[in-house]
Amino acid sequence: MSDTNALAAWLRLTLIPGIGGETQRKLLAAFGLPEAIFAAGRLEARRVVGDRADLLFDTDPADAIARSLEWAGQPGQTILTLADPGYPPALLEIADPPSLLYVRGNPDLLNRRGLAMVGSRNATPQGAQTAENFARHLAARGLCIVSGLALGIDAAAHRGALAANGDTVAVIGTGADRIYPARNKDLALAIAERGAIVSEFPLGTPAVAYNFPRRNRIISGLARGVLVVEAAPDSGSLITARLAA
């Protein structure tokens, strides 16, 4: 996004604690772009979201905005907003598309024909090999393999796509400036160089349990289908499959 002021307004809207996705969407529906929300002022915003509007005008995330702009100014790092032409149209079809996407790597991959591959973190060797083989075969035929960079099946799927010199996207549950789990550091660096790592969470966001099921809607949203390998009945992998359905 070329307009720094416009991006700063998007960041301001999304970096204020207590202003979640639903509130953001209400404000955007009422006023259009974030700059218009802040230009309208407190009283007009209150008519749309009530007292929550006070958070918008009483909170100053200037330091976080500056860090994010600096991050996005580095080579291979991008912040996409709902207003960007490069924002993946597939995510506009889900119930709660993220207002921002922090991307390390090639953002064009978010618009490729994708297949999500997910499954157990505690995969058997046979399961991991099966996932890697599927990913290698499908990536070699032009599908972008989308997964979550977790241990087990996710990691195997990313490895398979990379082994085929194909495309892969990792949707993570931390800030895009963090790598979790640490054991996947080398894999994450390879994906950032040859594919894309994507997060909706602000920079610096640590690994918090409830963020990982939430990121699953992006995994399924970017893909045309979901392949599940060795998933437990109550696992996040089946959440991803249900979201896709």
Image: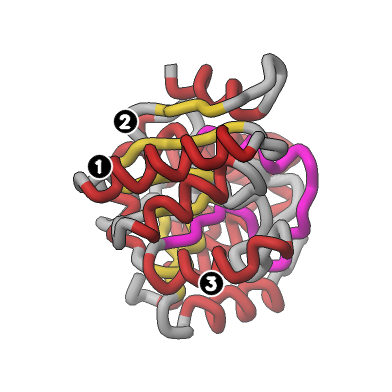
The disc at residue 224 is: 2
Q: Which residue is nearer to you in this view: 47 or 87?
A: 87
- The quadrant in which the C terminus is found is top left
Residue at figure coordinates x 55%, y 83% from the top left: 70
Q: Is residue 220 left or right of residue 122?
A: left
Residue 181 sits in quarter: bottom right
Q: Is residue 214 visible?
A: yes
Q: Earlier in the sequence, mark 3 or mark 2?
A: 3
Distance, label 2 to label 1, CA atoms, is 7 Å
Question: What residue would you read off at disc 1?
Answer: 113
Q: Residues within 10 Å of mark 1 (few under 14, many from 20)?
A: some
Q: Is residue 80 left or right of residue 188?
A: left
So how many labels did they put on this image? 3
Residue 204 sits in quarter: bottom right
Asked whether disc 2 touches disc 1, contact meaning CB atoms under 8 Å apart, the reply is yes
Residue at figure coordinates x 42%, y 61% from the top left: 196
- The quadrant in which the N terminus is found is bottom left
Q: Is residue 205 covered in magenta?
A: yes
Q: Is residue 120 above or below residue 161?
A: above
Q: Residues within 10 Å of mark 3 (few under 14, many from 20)?
A: some
As helix, strand or loop, the secondary structure at mark 1 comes to: loop
Q: Looking at the picture, how far across and down is residue 71, in whole percent?
A: 55, 79
As helix, strand or loop, the secondary structure at mark 2 comes to: loop
As helix, strand or loop, the secondary structure at mark 3 comes to: helix
Q: Looking at the picture, how far across and down is residue 31, in whole percent?
A: 44, 45
Q: Residues within 10 Å of mark 2 (few under 14, many from 20)?
A: few
Magenta extent: 196-217
The disc at residue 189 is: 3
Of the residues shown, which amino acid type is indicated by label 2?
Arg
